[in-house]
Image (tube, helix red, strand yellow):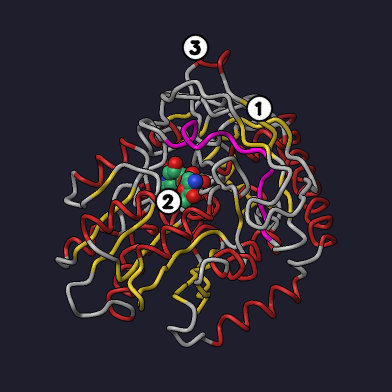
Amino acid sequence: MIGAPMIKVANIMTNCRICGNKIDKFMTFGRMPLANGFLTEAQFKDEYFFELAPAFCESCHTFQIVDQPAPEAMFHGEYAFFSQTSRSMAVHFEAFAKDTMARRLGPQDPFVVELGSNDGIMLRHFAKAGIRHLGIEPSANVAEAARAQGVNTRCAFFGAETAREIMAEHGQADIIQAANVMCHIPDLKSVAEGVALLLKPDGLLIFEDPYLGDVIRKTSYDQIYDEHVYVFSAMSVARIFGAHGLELVAVEPQKTHGGSMRYVVGRKGRHAVEASVAAALADEKALGLDRPETYDQFRRDCEASRDGLMAALNDLAAQGKRVVGYGATSKSTTVTQYCGITPRHVEFISDTTPTKQGKCSPGAHIPVKPYDAFASNYPDVALLFAWNHAEEIFAKEDGFRAAGGRWLVYVPEVKFIP
Ligand code: DWN
């Protein structure tokens, strides 16, 4: 655990966080460190581990991890992830902000709140347009980065209490947005309560997160890690917010993070429910997201993916090939730890985030180096941990391919490119 108080408490759930039904893990990814717990050698001895094991609630169909480290252990003053490290995500968030402004925002002095506003990557567009806004961000360092760009930011976790404080200061919100945030919050009841308080009568909550349908279809098991306590579906979102007088009124699939879903939620009966909701629910039923057999199959798919990736990496090691990881993602912690990838397989991981460089990856302790280390001495193979940014990365890495380099990917299947 880096830069945070030594909180070793994990929240082990035997009951669903949403409906209270009994839950049990359907598989385990084993002993896991914090996904963003990049560390120095001196910190190896104090490294925090927990068991990463997902469960599916047979009653409300919410996919969740059983054991989660305390939020303060994961989100703190030295949080390693900054949204602005990917150009395509910056483009995506600008489009998200502009779509909200064009289609969802009323004309009269609207007020927009963003939960988990990170470094202000989305809210800065509202700030630029002169729209009243407030970001709620629990990690002090990223909140500061947002303020430096003129984005009003409060350093806090969001819940009913914070909602009351915001209302007292600014009034109710027209829009509450969140991107890749809701799935991080264990106490969603408090968030839904806060949303129900803070939203104007015709206001909307619009949020997006990695989509369970894509995780199951693509075996992208690396979306499961400490920070992602939930992986949502339309089924689970309808149920979670439905219990608080709110209703799912639209869903919009997104390409980001290997397949995400944007959910639009309003007060019950205040908005027409779009056809996209019924279509998504039918699609999820057809995919079996409400059936335990689907998750048994997912476990087998994860094992096959792990075996395929390790066969490829062991083969490369036996041939004496140089393999370098590309992107020290949070997701890669699940992959390295579950599969058993070590510095013997992957020499180092190249990453453009200064706070990760010079440290080692959590658990596997693979050194993280600046991009120059990759570009100045291309390896034989680059293991694409940042597979969700493949389009952006492939477009700028012609030189690596021209030098004979190959990509190794594992989502949706283990394969070499070209
Ligand atoms: O939900 C979450 C998502 C949105 O972001 C968080 N819990 C944490 C984080 O997850 P992640 O670390 O898996 O996200 P990314 O966007 O897949 O991380 C990409 C990593 O790769 C960053 O560390 C930056 C790096 N990178 C790079 O070195 N070169 C990225 C690109 C595009 C590049 O060209």
Residue 228, above or below 378: below
Residue 402 shows in the view: no
User: What is the span of residues highlighted in magenta in the rendered image?
Assistant: 62-75
Position of the C terminus by quadrant: bottom right
Residue indicated by mark 3: 42
Q: Residue at x 59, y 47 (%)?
A: 229
Cα gap from disc 1 to disc 3, whole angstroms: 18 Å
Front position in the image: 188 or 67: 188
Asked whether residue 29 is drawn in magenta, I would say no
Dot 2 amino acid type: Gly
- Determine whether the residue tagged by mark 2 lies in a helix, strand or loop: loop
Label 3 CA crowd tier, 10 Å (few <14, some 14–19, many 20+): few
Q: Position of residue 370 (x, y in %)?
A: 40, 32
Would residue 196 appear left or right of 276 to someone viewing this image? Answer: left
Cα gap from disc 2 to disc 1, whole angstroms: 40 Å
- Determine whether the residue tagged by mark 3 lies in a helix, strand or loop: helix
Residue 58, above or below 288: above
